[in-house]
Image: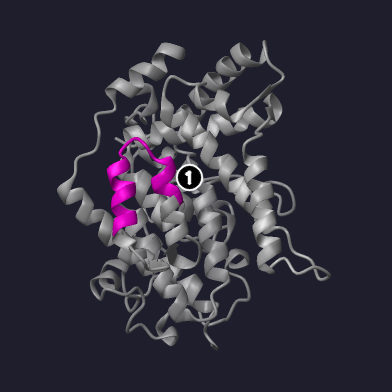
């Protein structure tokens, strides 16, 4: 079962609000020592300190000037002493502390209930597809629950300054073959002692036929938009559905999900005629994503001239229609709009088609299991390829 991150976030906000109410009713600010004793789950406190450390480190690195030499050894030593002193005088108001506590609770629950995804995401979210030694050291320092995996990554990277994400993912697989994740029950009981919850609330419920929301992007069926001979009808491959003609400037076209719902309800006539334009929409020459993935590298051996579209585009995001965005988000990114947006931005920044293919093959396809959405992944690949036709 997959985690329901919205439910986890709701709980984290309620937990943080309760804890902050108890503490800030008696205090104006919270210190580092008080943070370490705030929650009865030490990992929550440690995650907050970890966030403060990242801010402290960022502030330290911001000391740059065209007029002063901050690389001078004497200046660096003095600056380090100054920042070390500052680190011993943590003082955070509720306004700035509560969001940190929310994130810490969310991360703790994720680390407890799906530790495999937690460490996998940590590695995959590394900038420029490289995991640095500094980042691994920070992970090991502030990860207490299932810390054997964080320490294992630290041992694996050794003296190397950085490694590719794919290498680090291989290390995680090796560690998983030799170590078990901790039993989360005792930690969940400790969280529940502060704010009760049911563990099942943190998992997504399985949708049934009666409760499926046909308008949900995650459940939208694949389709091709085609022009129709009769403007008074919307023609699909399984049924002709009468519909009013929309106002071109104001009324939106009926969604495919709504049409499909009506088809499912009324049945499919046996004598349906598929217009030639719909047949022309499909191309038997296009490889499926299953074919492409069997070649190990998405797009390998597929010439751009063989793709369905021949016109180059300047922006991948601009070339994706609203309906396509819903489909890609639901089918290829598990309904995560932020993951979809980040992927589009990363692909748009690529300097070559090969670089984009590597991202899709080594990061996106395995992370979101694109083999299970071959048709949508193939459509997505075609759009991305148009960005690099003349490169």
Residue 75, quarter of the rendered image: bottom right
Residue under pointer 1: 217
Residue 212, compared with residue 171, is above or below; it is above
User: In the rendered structure, does residue 143 fall within the stretch colored magenta?
Assistant: yes
Q: Residue furthest right?
A: 67
In the depicted view, which residue is nearer to us: 258 or 89? Answer: 89
Q: Position of residue 349 (x, y in %)?
A: 58, 71
Q: Main secondary structure of the magenta part?
A: helix
Q: Is residue 162 left or right of residue 153?
A: right
Q: Where does the image place residue 202, in percent across and percent down from the top left?
A: 38, 27
Q: Is residue 374 above or below residue 25?
A: below
Q: Which residues are magenta?
A: 138-155
The answer, for residue 126, to whether it is visible in the render is yes
Pointer 1 local density, CA inside 10 Å: few below 14, some 14–19, many at least 20? many
**Quadrant holding the C terminus:** bottom right
Q: Position of residue 209 (x, y in %)?
A: 32, 31
- Report the quarter where the N terminus lies: top left
Q: Residue at x 33, y 81 (%)?
A: 300
179 is higher (above) or lower (below) than 28: below
> Where residue 235 sits: x, y (%)?
47, 55
- Give me the residue at 50% from left, 62% from top: 127
Q: Is residue 323 magenta?
A: no
Q: Is residue 224 above or below residue 85?
A: below
What residue do we see at 46% from left, 61% from top? Answer: 224
Depth check: give the residue in front, 308 or 169.
169
In front of the other: 151 or 258 = 151
Residue pictured at 40% horizontal, 84% vertical: 306
Q: Nearer the viewer, residue 228 or 286?
A: 286
For the residue labelled by badge 1, is the local secondary structure a helix, a strand or a loop? helix
- The quadrant holding residue 88 is top right
């Amino acid at each position: 079962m997959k985690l329901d991150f919205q439910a986890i976030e709701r709980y984290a906000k309620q937990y943080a609000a309760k804890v902050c109410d108890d503490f800030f009713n008696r205090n104006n600010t919270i210190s580092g020592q008080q943070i370490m004793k705030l929650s009865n789950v030490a990992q929550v406190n440690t995650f907050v300190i970890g966030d403060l450390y990242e801010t402290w480190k960022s502030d330290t690195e911001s000391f740059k000037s065209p007029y002063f030499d901050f690389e001078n050894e004497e200046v660096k030593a003095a600056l380090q002493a100054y920042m070390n002193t500052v680190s011993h005088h943590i003082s955070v108001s509720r306004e700035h502390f509560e969001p940190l506590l929310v994130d810490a609770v969310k991360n703790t629950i994720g680390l407890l209930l799906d530790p495999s995804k937690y460490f996998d995401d940590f590695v995959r979210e590394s900038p420029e597809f490289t995991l640095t030694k500094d980042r691994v050291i920070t992970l090991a320092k502030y990860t207490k629950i299932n810390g054997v995996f964080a320490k294992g990554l630290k041992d694996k990277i050794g003296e190397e300054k950085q490694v590719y994400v794919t290498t680090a993912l291989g290390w995680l697989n090796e560690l998983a073959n030799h170590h078990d994740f901790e039993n989360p029950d005792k930690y969940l009981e400790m969280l529940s002692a502060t704010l009760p919850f049911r563990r099942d609330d943190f998992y997504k419920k399985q949708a049934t036929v009666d409760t499926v929301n046909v308008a949900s992007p995650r459940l939208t069926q694949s389709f091709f938009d085609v022009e129709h001979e009769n403007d008074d009808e919307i023609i699909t491959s399984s049924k002709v559905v009468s519909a009013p003609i929309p106002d071109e400037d104001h009324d939106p076209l009926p969604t495919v999900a709504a049409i499909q719902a009506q088809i499912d309800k009324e049945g499919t006539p046996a004598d349906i005629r598929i217009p030639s334009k719909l047949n022309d929409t499909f191309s038997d020459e296009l490889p499926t994503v299953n074919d492409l993935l069997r070649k190990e590298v998405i797009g390998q051996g597929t010439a751009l001239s063989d793709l369905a579209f021949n016109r180059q585009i300047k922006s991948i995001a601009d070339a994706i229609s609203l309906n396509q965005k819903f489909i890609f988000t639901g089918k290829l990114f598990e309904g995560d709009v932020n993951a979809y947006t980040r992927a589009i931005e990363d692909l748009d920044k690529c300097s070559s088609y090969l670089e984009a293919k590597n991202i899709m093959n080594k990061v996106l396809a395995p992370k979101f299991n694109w083999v299970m959405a071959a048709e949508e992944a193939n459509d997505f690949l075609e759009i991305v390829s148009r960005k690099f036709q003349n490169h």
